[in-house]
Image: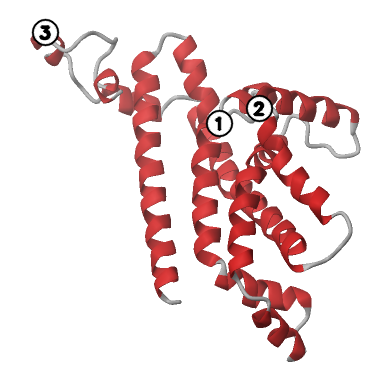
Amino acid sequence: MVWGSLLPRYEPPSAEALAKVSLAAYWKILSYPWLPNALKNTLILVLATPTLAVFLASVSAWVIVRTRLPGRRILDTLTFLPQGIPGVVLAMAFLWLYLRLRFIPIYGTIWIIVLCIATRHLAYSSRAMNAAMIQLHKELEEASQVSGATWLTTFFRITIPLLLPTVISTWIWSAIVCVRELSMAVMLYSPSTRVLSVLIWDLWLGGLVDYTCAIGVMLVIFLGVLLFVGRVAATRRARQY
């Protein structure tokens, strides 16, 4: 991919091809008209999708592990169910649902992509949070409640901080996967909500291999930095306990 980004058109490595190597594709892609909008939408996707998935997984894990509410096993099954649904089918379901629910005006916006991908990632997030919640003894939460704290205070100031290494790891995993998600994004995007994965697909179909590879290289570097920062943060937090 790095080699392809350095050539005006892809060709096997050779002395003749080496003479054509340049960074022109990187400079040109920075002025590509659709790139700023795709970057903005991708940033929203990276921030909102894993946050929503981890929050829903944390709340559902607390209900499943900590309570004795009737139907909590059904909730456990529902959080895992999206894993058994193909991404294209799930995206089509969201498409038809929000076409009909006109009082929720998210069709054609970035938020329908966020909801769809967050739903898809809920299965992994819920498994990770369930396992972490089981390892956290409930006496810590009971001590907080005895001291007069409300459930929300206990959840956000006791439970979540203690689960923070798992929260960070799950968030990072979800962020990385949602950036490279293509099938659902292709089904749900509009011209104003194109994300980087869709832009890469469009460039590839247009035969702009050098542009495609250049964006791919920059995306891999970004995800590598994101993964490194997240792992360092999670490791430091885990050492505190």
Q: Earlier in the sequence, mark 1 or mark 3?
A: 3
Q: Which residue corresponds to the image point at 54% horizontal and 66% vertical from the top-left?
A: 164
Identify the residue under disc 3.
Answer: 16
Q: Earlier in the sequence, mark 1 or mark 2?
A: 2
The x, y position of residue 180, in whole percent, is 50, 32
Amino acid type for the residue under numbered disc 3: Glu
Identify the residue under disc 1.
Answer: 181
Marks 1 and 2 sit apart, C-alpha to C-alpha, by 9 Å
Depth check: 41 or 68 in front? 68
Q: Which residue corresponds to the image point at 65% horizontal and 81% vertical from the top-left?
A: 140
**Mark 1 near mark 2, Cβ–Cβ under 8 Å?**
yes
Amino acid type for the residue under numbered disc 2: Gly
The x, y position of residue 198, in whole percent, is 55, 24
Location of residue 90 by image quarter: top right
2 vs 3, front mark = 2
Q: Secondary structure at mark 3?
A: helix
Q: Which residue corresponds to the image point at 58% horizontal and 54% vertical from the top-left?
A: 128
Task: Please rate how many residues cluster around mark 3, counting C-alpha atoms within 10 Å: few if below 14, some from 14 to 19, many from 20.
Answer: few
Q: Which residue corresponds to the image point at 65% horizontal and 49% vertical from the top-left?
A: 53
Depth check: 233 or 39 in front? 233
Query: Is residue 77 placed above or below 206 in the rendered structure?
Result: below
Task: Please rate how many residues cluster around mark 2, counting C-alpha atoms within 10 Å: few if below 14, some from 14 to 19, many from 20.
Answer: many
Depth check: 111 or 59 in front? 59
Marks 2 and 3 sit apart, C-alpha to C-alpha, by 43 Å
Location of residue 104 by image quarter: top right
Q: Earlier in the sequence, mark 2 or mark 3?
A: 3
Q: Which mark is residue 87?
A: 2
Marks 1 and 3 sit apart, C-alpha to C-alpha, by 36 Å
Q: Secondary structure at mark 2?
A: helix
